[in-house]
Image (tube, grey):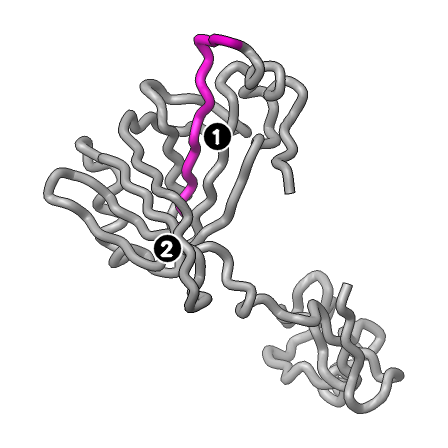
Amino acid sequence: MPLSISTDAIQEKNKLSSNDPWLLLLEIDYPGETPIRVVWNTEDITWDGETWHAFPVFKLGDMEETKEAEIPAVNLTFFDPGREVIPIVDEHGGGLGSEVWVYVVHSAYLSNTTPEFEQEFEIIEAKIGYDFSINLKLGAENLINRRSPQDRYLKGHCRYKEFKGSLCGYSGSETDCNRTFERCRELGNQARFGGFPGIGKIGYWRTV
């Protein structure tokens, strides 16, 4: 499937020469931390309302695939001589399982908040080198972890995860709910019940 990019990017791609580079952006989301946002560049940039801090040396490998049907992976290395990122990586033990987003944008069109390319990964291995390098092995999305079918509608079980949340709507004095229709009726909140009492015992699966 061909990569779809903007008209501006096509014009830049077709130029014989240009002083405006393509930029590789990396966003690492560690739980409980402000996302780490870095850019392969010699100076900081502002894109999509956020500041991306310049890291001048990146090494991004090719996507690795094996005949054993393992999750495709790519190796990413960047250097942090100022130790801006290393303490966070170290504190989280590498942050295995944390989300990583890779974006490609063009420096001449940073007002365009839609990236020319984006890909979500997760950290499956992390190492900190003696030379202030951060080495991440990024795994592509594992489709086995994606729910399929996407949604299930149940007869007697509420799908709202937050008791007293905006969807639940209960505002009484009770502090717990087991998310059943019977409990919802005890609380006098059955009009807001997040299940589907009329669809039968086994429920209904929605695939699209």
Q: Would you identify the image quadrant in which residue 124 lies? A: bottom left
State the residue at coordinates (77%, 63%): 208
Q: Which residue is mark 1?
A: 50
State the residue at coordinates (39%, 60%): 97
Q: Which amino acid type is shown beneath numbered disc 1? A: Glu
Disc on res. 160: none
Q: Which residue is mark 2?
A: 123
* Local crowd size for mark 1, using a 10 Å CA cut-off: few (<14), some (14–19), many (≥20): few
Residue 171 appears anywhere in the view: no
State the residue at coordinates (54%, 20%): 110
Q: CA distance from mark 2 to mark 1?
A: 22 Å
Q: Position of residue 56 (x, y in %)?
A: 29, 25
In this rendering, position of residue 91 left or right of residue 203: left
Residue 152 appears anywhere in the view: yes
In this rendering, position of residue 206 left or right of residue 123: right
State the residue at coordinates (46%, 13%): 20
The answer to which of 111 and 120 lies nearer the viewer is 120
Examine the rendered structure and indicate whether residue 13 appears above or below residue 155: above
- What's drawn in magenta, residue-wise? 16-29
Element class at badge 2: strand
Element class at badge 1: strand
Asked if labels 1 and 2 touch by Cβ distance under 8 angstroms, the answer is no
Q: Position of residue 32 (x, y in %)?
A: 39, 53
Examine the rendered structure and indicate whether residue 35 appears above or below residue 21: below
The answer to which of 141 and 171 lies nearer the viewer is 141
Determine if the magenta segment contains residue 156. Answer: no
Q: Which amino acid type is shown beneath numbered disc 2? A: Ile
For marks 2 and 1, give the one nearer the viewer. Answer: 2
Earlier in the chain: of badge 2 and badge 1, it is 1
